[in-house]
Amino acid sequence: MKKLLWAALILFASSPAMAEVEGVVSSIKPIHSLVENVLGDSGKSALIVTGNQSPHGYHLRPSEVKKLSTARVVFYIDDDFETFLVKPLSNLDKNVVRVPLVKAAGIPLLEARTSGTWEAHIHAGEEDAKHDEHEENDEHHAHEDMHVWLAPENAIQMVGAIEKALSETYPAQAKTFHANAAHTIKKLNALDKKLRTTLKPVEGKPYIVFHDAFQYFEKAYGLTSVGSITLSPEQAPSAKRIKEVRAKVSGLKAVCVFSEAQFSKRLVDSVMEGSTAKSRVLDEHGANIQPGKDLYFILLSRIAERMESCLK
């Protein structure tokens, strides 16, 4: 009897379903967090962009190239977002599964707002300023906004795509991934409900952001951003841009100007000059949050709390 029991235990322990999932790689912290939730206790995902670094203008280090070299499946937003991954991914073995989540999840994209100030109605007297903005933007062609993870609705779609890719790559764990994905979606729905309650009192109040990263969050919760300090976080805004945004802060009575964790607060202080606007730091990537399952939920809760505290 004891021999049969030991044989059964050995067989169970050595079965494929018990093997730890390895070779999962995620590009940025919010995606890594969602992947970790779907993986659960079955394994860990390696993270490429760690610490408080921004993926904008990012360059891979040798240690990160090494992470990719052992990958079986790689999750990222899109080739147009993590441009630093395009060449390394093309060099990987053809059997490595590449999952650009925007496409895999079928997320409808919003057009990036590239004018710097985008309130709905431009007064006739401001047409010259608008023309100047277009001149400054000649090299910034209209493109699509890739900050899709900042809406729980999109995160739910991505969780479905993550579950599908993991289940196809590691079929022995498919049931586990399905259960974990269902639990994660339940948590995302609860998060969405909490954020709606938090942000309801500040709907429609105008504010300025450092760069236009929060459009999906704004659309989800009825928020009113009226412009950004810079068109691209890789490029410092011109003196003309600063002057125009400063005029918007005063003219539209912007309640708050938001800076970002990875960038200098000096520019924010400059556009706030002479106004009564308040300031807070927003972080769309989770720069100062410990990577892991909880990061996504902490990240969006923190954005909502800081917006509410500044706009109320």
Image: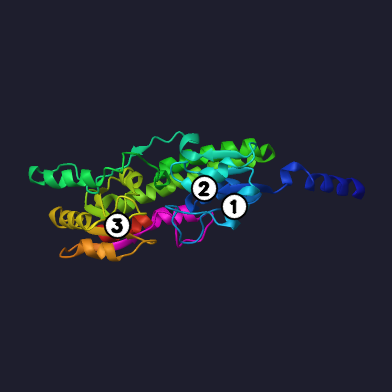
Q: Say which of 207 and 223 sits in front.
A: 207
Between marks 1 and 3 in the image, the one whose residue lies nearer the viewer: 1
Residue at left offset 62%, top offset 42%: 92
Residue beneath disc 1: 65
Residue 305 location (% of width, % of height):
34, 58
Answer few, some or many: residues within 10 Å of disc 2's Cα (few below 14, many 20 plus, some between 14 and 19). many
Gap in angstroms between the C-alphas marked 2 and 1: 22 Å
Dot 3: element: helix
223 left or right of 234 in image:
left
- Residue wearing tag 3: 308
Type of amino acid at the residue the image marks with label 2:
Leu
Quadrant position of residue 176 = top right
In this rendering, the label closer to the viewer, 2 or 1: 1
Measure how far apart labels 1 and 3 are at the Cα level.
40 Å
- The residue sitting at 42% across, 49% down in the picture is 191
**Which is nearer the eye, 241 or 195?**
241
Mark nearer the N terminus (2 vs 1): 2
Please give left or right for residue 7 compared with residue 67 in the image.
right
Give the extent of the magenta segment: 280-302
The residue at the point 43 percent across, 42 percent down is: 80
Occupied quadrant, residue 275: bottom left
Q: Which residue bears the numbered disc 2?
A: 34
Residue 312 can be seen, yes or no: no
Q: Secondary structure at mark 1?
A: helix
Nearest to viewer (mark 3 / mark 2): 2
Residue contact between numbered discs 1 and 3, judged by CB atoms under 8 Å: no
